[in-house]
Image (cartoon, helix red, strand yellow):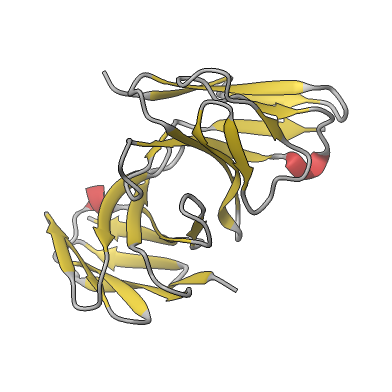
Amino acid sequence: EDQVTQSPEALRLQEGESSSLNCSYTVSGLRGLFWYRQDPGKGPEFLFTLYSAGEEKEKERLKATLTKKESFLHITAPKPEDSATYLCAVPGSGTYKYIFGTGTRLKVLA
Amino acid sequence: EAQVTQNPRYLITVTGKKLTVTCSQNMNHEYMSWYRQDPGLGLRQIYYSMNVEVTDKGDVPEGYKVSRKEKRNFPLILESPSPNQTSLYFCATIPQGSTDTQYFGPGTRLTVL
């Protein structure tokens, strides 16, 4: 069964304290792994797509990496405005079916 | 401004009273989808539509109906809502020719008493 698991469930960081969020997946034939950011009371906002092991993508203080079993979202020197829930997702069976993880709630303290 | 809109944003209703949550997009995207988000369960796909008059079930379609009579609209219909359908609902779209970037609406918080 296709599955996405994110850890930790919640993470509190001091401003400037770098860390990583994990997304492990079980899917037959990976056709992409997606990262989203979700602010309270809002819909998820697309961040990155990764397609193959070894691929990396960066956006400001965020860098996403992909291996054959998991993806990491590295946050370097985070700021309070990086506080949000970060979701990862993979396509399931069928072209337009998607499976989301339960997310990591990140809180960055000033 | 490119956007996905949902109405209503908040709704409290009673068991069995039919309701419709509307989703509209102004980006001419072919693909539209409905999700529900529950604590501890994450986002789960309810139904999706690849184009007008083409819809398919996601992982949790029971108790829901959809229709896609025109490209810009994709309403979610609850014929007889039950308390276990209390949730936060999101509509999403994907541009033509893409399978990755989903654009989400602002969400509809539904409470069924």
Residue toward you, B51 or B109 = B51
Q: Residue furthest right?
A: B16
Q: Is residue B44 left or right of residue A81?
A: right
Q: Residue furthest bottom?
A: A68
Quadrant position of the N terminus of chain B in the picture: top left
Quadrant of residue B62 within the rendered picture: top right
Residue pictured at 84% horizontal, 26% vertical: B14
Is B40 above or below relative to B52?
Answer: below
Q: Is residue A94 visible?
A: yes
Residue B78 in percent (x, y) is at 75, 30
Quadrant of residue A59 within the rendered picture: bottom left
Is B58 above or below relative to B21?
Answer: below
Residue pictured at 60% horizontal, 74% vertical: A1
Residue A15 in percent (x, y) is at 19, 61
Is A62 above or below relative to B31?
Answer: below
Residue toward you, A89 or A12 = A89
Is B32 above or below relative to B12?
Answer: below
Residue B112 in percent (x, y) is at 78, 33
Q: Is residue A53 left or right of residue B83?
A: left
Quadrant position of the C terminus of chain B in the picture: top right
Residue pictured at 88% horizontal, 28% vertical: B16
Residue pictured at 42% horizontal, 73% vertical: A29
Residue toward you, B76 or B84 = B76
